[in-house]
């Protein structure tokens, strides 16, 4: 995408956004004087893209799940939501609501005014409209996933209207999202370098599959994924032809696996996520720490879980799925620094400056995050790496899950999805790669485990737990860190980090923010809040 245009027009919001429904795009974006040349439409469209996902929201969101813990009060107090100690006044709900509607407003402003722009090529106009409608659909998907019924706003509205508009039934908003994404199928399969990062046909199709996945509409999910994978309706998409860890490196931005991302660029537009992820010896703070539960999810190289006798608890990281080391920095990890040397990170108790709980900057779980590590980051913390929102691996996993739920998953589907992902990950053992020949809940467990390992720390885990209705199980009780044996009688010596609480009668939906209901008494509240 043309970053210089983005920088020229965006008023960036702090953290997750602080705009409301009545906040303007730029000072006088709706004035007729603004919409008097084709470049104005481009500027307005480009201003919609950074709203897709805030960098910190993207990474902190994973700590709402059982994949990680945050000790930080940074931003919107994710930790309080994760352990159930939040109310209708929680800042996380407020900030997500406001940021998504601010993004929707930017899209509505463009869509309301683009017809006024003189000299804009008709084909380009239609493409801009399709991009804006796809972005708007993305925002609404986040909203209904979190809040259920939400106000459906499809045009720029006044402050008075914003203070009286009621919630729209989720089913109606859902259909609106699906219709928007169907329209967006007019988008091209790809763009040349200056415009990379924009919504494509493939991104719209994959997002529609994700939306339908959350509704358990398995046949529709399977049909869309089949169109992408087998019929190549979205172009020549595939897994990145390199290592799993290299997929996320800045040198490989925009590779063949990426369907949708948020664009960043060194110096001009960077994010500071790395500071929250890496050990203090590398200049980090460890605000986000992977859990023992995530580490335990990764298979052994023989394709078995850690319940297998081959697993050695005293040597827990040997002979494991290579994606574990590509995702998690653990005791003994070798991390390349900016000079090209290898730094050994030690996290066991008493082993140095990076050790568990050695200081307030250290991990409370014994783990740091390696998945997005950028050795080229300025000061090792300010990175120009993109944030990948949708990738082809997710399409393969959605296809596998849908076919399994439809009881039509067999050897062909296995080879096309799970085997392909494990081969790219680095598995070579036949037991891990060969079709296991199981169905029902056994195959369901395999696919869900694979999904967690492949997509860990990419912000999708909470969505999965909600739609599987397993959040009430895995998000209740203690989240753990590494085994320290400080108290061997408690949880077999694994350190307790955070006591999670998930009330199935209310927590599958967030409360409508009280601050919004104070401004608009037409907004009803979700059950039991």
Image: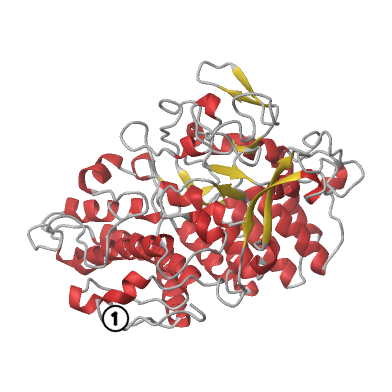
User: Farthest residue toward the left?
Assistant: 33
Residue at 72% over, 41% down:
482
Instruction: Relative to 45, say whether 495 is above or below.
Output: above
The colour scheme applied to this rendered structure is: secondary structure
Q: Quadrant of residue 121?
A: bottom left
Residue at 69% over, 64% down:
401
- Nearer to me, 148 or 233: 148
Residue 190 pos. (x, y %):
44, 49
Residue at 32% over, 72% down:
516
Residue 203 pos. (x, y %):
48, 57
Residue 66 pos. (x, y %):
64, 55
Residue at 86% over, 50% down:
307
- Nearer to me, 375 or 223: 375
Residue 130 visible from this viewpoint: yes
Q: What secondary structure is found at the residue carrying circle 1?
A: loop
Q: Quadrant of residue 167?
A: bottom left
Query: How busy is the neighbourhood of tag 1: few (under 14 within 10 Å), some, or many (20 plus)?
Result: some
Instruction: Relative to 413, say whether 429 is above or below.
Output: above
Image quadrant occupied by the N terminus: top left
Instruction: Relative to 381, say whether 214 is above or below.
Output: below
Residue 183 pos. (x, y %):
40, 69
- Nearer to me, 458 or 524: 524
What residue does disc 1 label? 165
Residue 244 visible from this viewpoint: no
User: Farthest residue toward the right?
Assistant: 309
């Amino acid at each position: 995408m043309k970053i210089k245009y983005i920088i020229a027009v965006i008023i960036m919001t702090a953290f997750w956004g602080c705009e409301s429904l009545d906040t303007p795009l730029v000072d006088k974006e709706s004035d007729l004087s603004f919409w008097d040349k084709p470049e104005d439409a481009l500027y307005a469209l480009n201003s919609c893209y950074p709203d897709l996902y805030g960098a910190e929201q993207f990474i902190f969101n994973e700590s709402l799940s059982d994949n990680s813990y945050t000790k930080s009060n940074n931003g919107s107090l994710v930790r309080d939501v994760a352990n159930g100690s939040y109310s209708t006044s929680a800042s996380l709900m407020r900030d997500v609501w406001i940021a998504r509607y601010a993004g929707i407003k930017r899209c509505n402003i463009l869509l309301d005014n683009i017809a006024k722009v003189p000299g804009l090529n008709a084909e380009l106009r239609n493409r801009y409209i399709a991009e804006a409608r796809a972005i708007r659909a993305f925002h609404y998907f986040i909203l209904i996933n979190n809040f259920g019924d939400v106000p459906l706003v499809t045009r720029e509205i006044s402050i008075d209207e914003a203070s009286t508009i009621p919630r729209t039934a989720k089913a109606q908003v859902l259909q609106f999202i699906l219709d928007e994404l169907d329209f967006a199928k007019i988008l091209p399969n790809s763009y040349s370098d200056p415009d990379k990062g924009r919504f494509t046909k493939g991104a719209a199709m994959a997002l529609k599959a994700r939306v339908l996945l959350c509704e358990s509409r398995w046949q529709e999910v399977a049909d869309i994924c089949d169109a992408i994978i087998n019929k190549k309706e979205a172009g020549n998409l595939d897994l990145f032809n390199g290592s799993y860890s290299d997929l996320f490196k800045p040198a490989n931005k925009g590779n063949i696996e990426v369907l949708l991302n948020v664009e960043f660029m060194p110096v001009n537009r960077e994010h500071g996520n790395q500071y929250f992820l890496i050990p203090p010896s590398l200049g980090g703070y460890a605000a986000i720490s992977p859990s023992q539960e995530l580490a335990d999810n990764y298979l052994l190289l023989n394709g078995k879980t850690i319940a297998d006798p081959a697993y050695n608890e005293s040597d827990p990281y040997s002979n494991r799925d290579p994606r574990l080391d590509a995702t998690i920095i653990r005791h003994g990890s070798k991390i390349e620094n900016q000079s090209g040397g290898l730094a050994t990170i030690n996290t066991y108790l008493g082993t140095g400056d990076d050790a568990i709980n050695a200081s307030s900057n250290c991990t409370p779980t014994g783990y740091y995050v390696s998945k997005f590590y950028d050795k080229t980051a300025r000061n090792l913390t300010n990175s120009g790496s993109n944030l990948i929102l949708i990738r082809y691996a997710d399409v393969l996993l959605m296809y596998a899950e849908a076919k399994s739920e439809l009881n039509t998953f067999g050897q062909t589907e296995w080879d096309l999805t799970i085997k392909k992902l494990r081969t790219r990950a680095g598995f070579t053992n036949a037991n891990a790669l060969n079709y296991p020949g199981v169905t029902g809940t056994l195959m369901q467990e395999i696919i869900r485990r694979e999904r967690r390992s492949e997509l860990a720390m990419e912000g999708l885990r909470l969505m999965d737990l909600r739609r599987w209705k397993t959040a009430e199980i895995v998000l209740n009780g203690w989240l753990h860190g590494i085994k320290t044996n400080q108290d061997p009688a408690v949880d077999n010596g694994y350190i307790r980090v955070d006591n999670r609480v998930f009330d199935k009668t209310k927590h599958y939906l967030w409360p409508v923010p009280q601050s919004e209901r104070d401004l608009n008494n037409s907004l009803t509240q979700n059950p039991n809040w």
